[in-house]
Image (tube, rainbow, N blue to C red):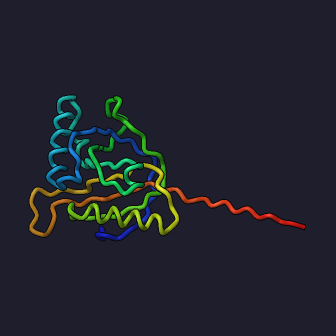
Amino acid sequence: MIVGLVFFEYMPKREISVMKTSINYFEQGYESYERMLHVFKSNLIQNNIPLSYFFNAGTIISKDNFDHQEYFSDTLFIFIDDSYPPNNSCIALKESLYMCICADDPDKEKEYAKKLYHEMKQQGYTLDGDYLCELLTQFPFSNHGSPIKYKIQIPLSKNKKLVFFLFIC
């Protein structure tokens, strides 16, 4: 994992389960994330869902908010499989090309998100879904920087510019 390097990744269709909270991650940073996780984990326990799904819980910024550079995230997600109990919180992420960036400092998420946004625009892509920030690893204690590693990913589509030629004879 190279921190701060923008890269492309083609992702197959994936399923997630989402939960809205009353907490905005970007208001208080990592402390907010920890509070959001506590609420989500409690919800999983209350609904008898195995905590193995909780491995890489992440945050979502809606497509509209990210497209307008509004950094607001009150929604958490987890990746799920076919054995996850069906409910209203399950959403399918379509197969797509994603622009990604990995990081290890939660205080820099907004900076990296802006970097992705500008790179997306510069390369002529448009946003084709919600912004996902997936937790890759979390260590309880770390003597070398941040205890977490995460990947921001945004689904893309290519801008299609139609060019019309008028021929006059």
Q: Find residue 12 and report its horizontal and vertical position in percent.
A: 45, 50
- Is 119 left, or right, of 124 in this rendering? left
Residue drawn 32% across the image and 44% down it: 79
Q: Find residue 111 and report its horizontal and vertical position in percent.
A: 29, 65
Establish if 36 lies above or below 26: above
Quadrant for the C terminus in the image: bottom right
Q: Nearer the viewer, residue 86 or 25?
A: 25
Q: Find residue 156 and report its horizontal and vertical position in percent.
A: 48, 56
Q: Find residue 61 and report its horizontal and vertical position in percent.
A: 34, 50
Establish if 71 lies above or below 114: above
Residue drawn 20% across the image and 52% down it: 27
* Numbered label tally: 0
- Is 3 left, or right, of 119 in this rendering? left
Establish if 19 lies above or below 69: above
- Is 98 left, or right, of 43 in this rendering? right
Residue 15 sits in which quadrant?
A: top left
Residue drawn 56% across the image and 59% down it: 159
Residue drawn 39% across the image and 38% down it: 91
Quick one: which residue is furthest to the right in this view?
169
Quadrant for the N terminus in the image: bottom left
